[in-house]
Image (cartoon, rainbow, N blue to C red):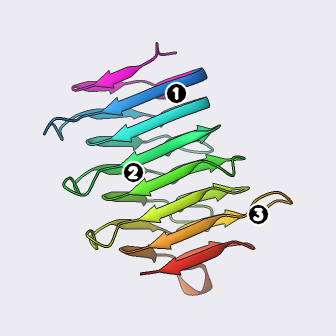
Amino acid sequence: YAADPVNNFGTISGVSAGVYLLGHAESVTNGGGGDTSALIQGDNGVHAVGTTTVVNLGTILGTGGGSAGRGVLLDGQGSLTNGNVTDTTAEIRGSNIGAYIVYRATLVVTNFGTIDASGASAGSFGVYLYNGGNLTNGSSADGVALIAGYVGVGGRANQLASPTVVNFGTITGTGEGPNGVGVDVNSGSGING
């Protein structure tokens, strides 16, 4: 468990999670001020439950197997920002899922860098929006933003919310055959460019 806020300019490494937050009004900042070498890593890189703001300007890695291997796992309100308009080198990588957003329609994901999952199965997503969430990949000034996975972006809706995806960069599904889908959000919406 980590104290709030977490500001990392070096390396944080853990077994089950690099950073695990449980509570309200929490924040994680990885890198900043021109420091892109900051690293957070664990079976899940960052695992947060509650209202959480995550800003990554370095690298976050989820290296675990099985149900772990998530670069960032957010279960609550808040936001995830990877990079910014002037820092497109920020990386979130998971062996299973790059960023997994659970049960929250209002959670906002903004990617200017790379969010990637290296798993070789249909359950491996660059970003997964579970029961809502809003994802913007890149901006009109940033066309290099990348989200990649066996399925690039996956998601599902519930009776209250549907995922929304806005893309100015690249979203790619690396899977074989019909599983290699860029965006697969059940009952969600998407805008490309």
Q: Earlier in the sequence, mark 2 or mark 3?
A: 2
Visible residue check, residue 136: yes
Which residue lies most toward the front here? 140
Magenta stretch bounds? 1-21
- The answer to which of 84 and 22 lies nearer the viewer is 84
**26 lies above or below 97:** above
| Residue annotated with mark 2 | 93
Circle 1: element type: loop
| Residue annotated with mark 3 | 157
For residue 129, what is the image quadrant? bottom right
- Disc 2 or disc 1, which is closer to the eye? 2
- The answer to which of 59 and 138 lies nearer the viewer is 138
Which residue lies most toward the right here? 159
Mark 3 Cα-neighbour bin, 10 Å: few <14, some 14–19, many ≥20:
many
- Disc 2 or disc 3, which is closer to the eye? 3
In the rendered image, residue 102, in percent from the top left (x then y), is placed at 67, 46
Image quadrant holding the C terminus, namely bottom left
**43 lies above or below 87:** above
In the rendered image, residue 44, in percent from the top left (x then y), is placed at 50, 37
Q: Residue at x 61, y 67 (%)?
A: 164
Circle 2: element type: strand
Q: Are marks 3 and 1 in contact (CB under 8 Å)?
A: no
| Residue annotated with mark 1 | 16
Q: Is residue 151 left or right of residue 193?
A: right
- The number of numbered discs placed on residues in the rendered structure image is 3
Circle 3: element type: loop
**49 lies above or below 189:** above
Q: Residue at x 24, y 34 (%)?
A: 31
